[in-house]
Image (spheres, rainbow, N blue to C red):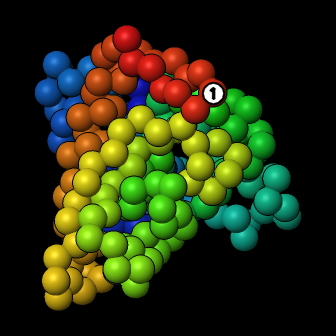
Amino acid sequence: ARLVVLISGSGSNLKALLDASADPGYGATVVAVGADRDGIAGLDIAAEAGVPTFVDRVKDFATRGEWDAALTAHVAEHKPDLIISAGFLKLVGAEFLAAFGDRYLNTHNALLPSFPGIHGPRDALEYGVKVTGATLFFVDAGVDTGPIVAQTVVPVLDGDTEADLTERIKEAERRQLVEQVGRLVREGWTITGRKVTIP
Ligand code: GRF
């Protein structure tokens, strides 16, 4: 299966997918990496692995819709079976979702529907929950609201800083992403309402 991975940052989830796909039994290969900004470590990771990259910056387009159309076209060129937002910090638009809505995954660093948005670990710490975690879901038109594929629970420990908790969640997140993407591409999936079924 062909994976396109979208990133905005350090690319540790991307790296985990690249490492997993080195095993032919994994069933998926990262065929391209897209970003919404230049100069991020994740793009270097892709280049080192010899994977083609593209960058679509919102500010280079007259409207958000034109950006969304360009991103959709760039992703489509690589004929992906599955697209993975691995720390991609932009909400895609209607055109992207029309093209890929049933095969666009995102990984979030909290147990949805708790703590959506870009500060999952910080918000969990501030609330004082004792467990949080990582959620893998198919993206829909809302913010972190789509059908859930899998969740992993991570404890919040006394004295955790935001950095401590973020790192603990990211370890679980990478493991979950690699495991579940492998399972999806090998076994297929259907989405019915909020339910994701893997046969
Ligand atoms: C992940 O924890 C994701 O949930 C959050 O950003 C992180 C991406 O990290 N939105 P990386 O770029 O894969 O290292």
Check the image and report above or below for 45 versus 60: above
Image position, residue 99 (x, y; %): 69, 30
Q: Amino acid at mark 1?
A: Gly
Which residue does the image show at 70% across and 46% down from the upper left?
A: 141
Q: Would you identify the image quadrant in which residue 57 lies?
A: bottom right
Image position, residue 92 (x, y; %): 67, 51
Check the image and report above or below for 125 versus 12: below
In this picture, residue 34 sits left or right of residue 90: left
Dot 1: element: loop
Image position, residue 172 (x, y; %): 22, 54
Q: Would you identify the image quadrant in which residue 74 lies?
A: top right
In this picture, residue 65 sits left or right of residue 101: right
Q: Nearer the viewer, residue 30 or 101?
A: 101
Q: Nearer the viewer, residue 86 or 193?
A: 193
> Which part of the image, by quadrant, shows the C terminus?
top left
Q: Badge 1 local density, few (<14 within 10 Å), some, or many (20+)?
A: few
Tell me: is circle 1 under 8 Å from ligand 1.
Answer: no
Q: Which residue is mark 1?
A: 193
Q: Is residue 128 visible?
A: yes
> Which part of the image, by quadrant, shows the N terminus?
top left
Q: Is residue 41 visible?
A: no
- Extreme-right residue of the structure: 62
Q: How many marks?
A: 1
